[in-house]
Image: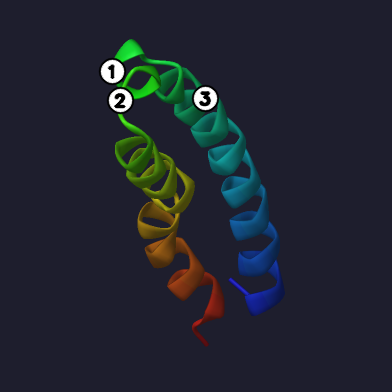
Amino acid sequence: MRKSQRKFLGSVVMLAFVLVYALIAMVIAQAPAIQHAPGFAQFIAYAVLGLAWVLPLMPLIKWMERD
């Protein structure tokens, strides 16, 4: 598979994943455990939810960039 094809396919998969992940993260963020937590705990929870999508996508990004 050519690199341009991998980038296109990877971009489509990445977009679909991020859309689904955002919906799941919104549901988790509305959990009573997070909503009623102290401010610092909420900050940590939102930071983790905001950055957690990167780890599952790293192998896909590496696959897209290889020769």
Going from N to C along the chain, the mark reached first, 2 or 3, is 3
Q: Which element is circle 3 on?
A: helix
Q: Which residue is nearer to you in this view: 58 or 27?
A: 27
10 Å crowding of disc 1: few (<14), some (14-19), many (20+): few
Q: Which residue is drawn at 35% across and 39% down?
A: 45
Which residue lies under the disc numbered 3? 26
Instruction: Locate residue 39: give its quadrant.
Output: top left
**From mark 2 to mark 3, how far is it between C-alphas?**
16 Å
Which residue lies under the disc numbered 1? 33
Scheme by which the image is coloured: rainbow
Q: Which residue is drawn at 45% across and 17% down?
A: 30
Instruction: Please identify, in this view, whether the residue under mark 1 or under mark 3 is nearer the observer.
Output: 1
Where the N terminus falls, by quadrant?
Answer: bottom right
Going from N to C along the chain, the mark reached first, 1 or 3, is 3
**From mark 2 to mark 1, how far is it between C-alphas?**
6 Å
Which residue lies under the disc numbered 2? 37
- Dot 2 amino acid type: Ala
- Dot 1 amino acid type: Ala
Instruction: Count numbered badges in the picture.
Output: 3
**Where does residue 48 sit, x and y in percent of width and height?**
36, 47
**Where does residue 36 sit, x and y in percent of width and height?**
34, 17
- Dot 3 amino acid type: Met
Q: Which element is circle 2 on?
A: loop
Instruction: Locate residue 40: give its quadrant.
Output: top left
**Where does residue 43 sit, x and y in percent of width and height?**
40, 43
Pointer 2 with pointer 3, Cβ within 8 A: no
10 Å crowding of disc 3: few (<14), some (14-19), many (20+): few
Q: Which element is circle 1 on?
A: helix
Give the side of residue 10 with respect to residue 25, left or right: right
